[in-house]
Amino acid sequence: MQDQAARLRQLVDKTEYEPQAPVETNKPSLSALGPRVIAITSGKGGVGKTNITVNLAIALGMTGQRVLVIDADLGMANVDVVLGSMSKKHLLNLLEKDVQLQDVLIKGPYGVNYISGGSGIEKAADFTYEERQRLMQKLNGCGQMADIILIDTGAGLGKNVMDFILAADEVLLITTPEPTALTDAYAVLKAYSMYAANKNIKLVVNRVYDEVESREVVAKLQQTSTRFLNMPIDCLGYVFEDSAVMKSVRQQQPFLAAQPASVASRCIQGLANSILYGSKMTVKRGWKGFLRQIFNFSR
């Protein structure tokens, strides 16, 4: 699996990226080796992984970062759905000789550039040597068009998922407080601890009702991971349960764009700041937010 991860790393190979001359900017300085490659994953489906990925891309873009989302949930892609967008070609179309990177790159709404993983794809796993070479060659250009590349992986411990996780520089593991989500998140941590050469994984706890609940969830996974895996893990932040999220999903709009003042949107902006500046999240519901959540949640 390590050999496979090393080959997949070349899909967004940073060593061949030629850095441009530095420019005075307010943005955080980026490595001369190229973009940050962040895989966003989860132990199980339904925890909000793709929703967080898309909204995080918007938040990072609002700071001036060039962000590219690659939907690596091959065959079960949902980035299109969250954005309310549509793509005619997807990642695996790059295997076709006459299809180039610009043919699959979608300039979606809200400033999100992405490559779809496609839906209902039968072949989404085993590539021949020739196919890998073709993908590596065509995807190499991604390193020159983005400051941050977000890889939205599938859920679980499938071969594709682990390959993308192990190939990324950083990993965000999305979970919720539900026992099944925590169990599956631990399974991902266990596999990652066994195969990752350079461990760099952080937790994001979605759908929590308050910061205390988030800390409790993180503490459980941190204690278990440290004790049984000998792998300390940090928490990047959390996203509060918010009725605005479901309303936006039904409307096929990212909640950060549809309801930027919502508490979930403020959490996403906090996560973006944590990624860029290493700052600790301090988002609070407040009394008005508490009342709004209690009385409007079911609407």
Image (cartoon, grey):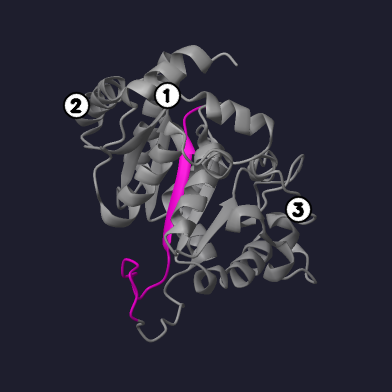
**Where is mark 3, residue-wise?**
87
**Where is mark 1, residue-wise?**
176
Kindly identify which numbered label has been placed on residue 62: none
Instruction: Judge whether residue 35 is colored magenta.
Output: yes
Position above or below: 297 against 74: above
Q: Position of residue 123 (x, y in %)?
A: 73, 46
Labelled pair 1, 3 in contact (Cβ < 8 Å): no
Residue type at mark 3: give it.
Ser
Mark before the other along the chain sequence, 1 or 3:
3
Left or right of 215 on screen, residue 125 = right
Q: Position of residue 158 (x, y in %)?
A: 55, 36
**Where is mark 2, residue-wise?**
227
Q: Mark 1 or 2, which is nearer the eye?
A: 1
Residue type at mark 1: give it.
Thr
Left or right of 4 on screen, residue 232 = left
Residue type at mark 2: give it.
Arg
* Magenta-drawn segment: 24-44
Mark before the other along the chain sequence, 2 or 3:
3
The residue at 26%/29% (across/down) is 225
The residue at 61%/33% (across/down) is 248
Position above or below: 258 against 134: above
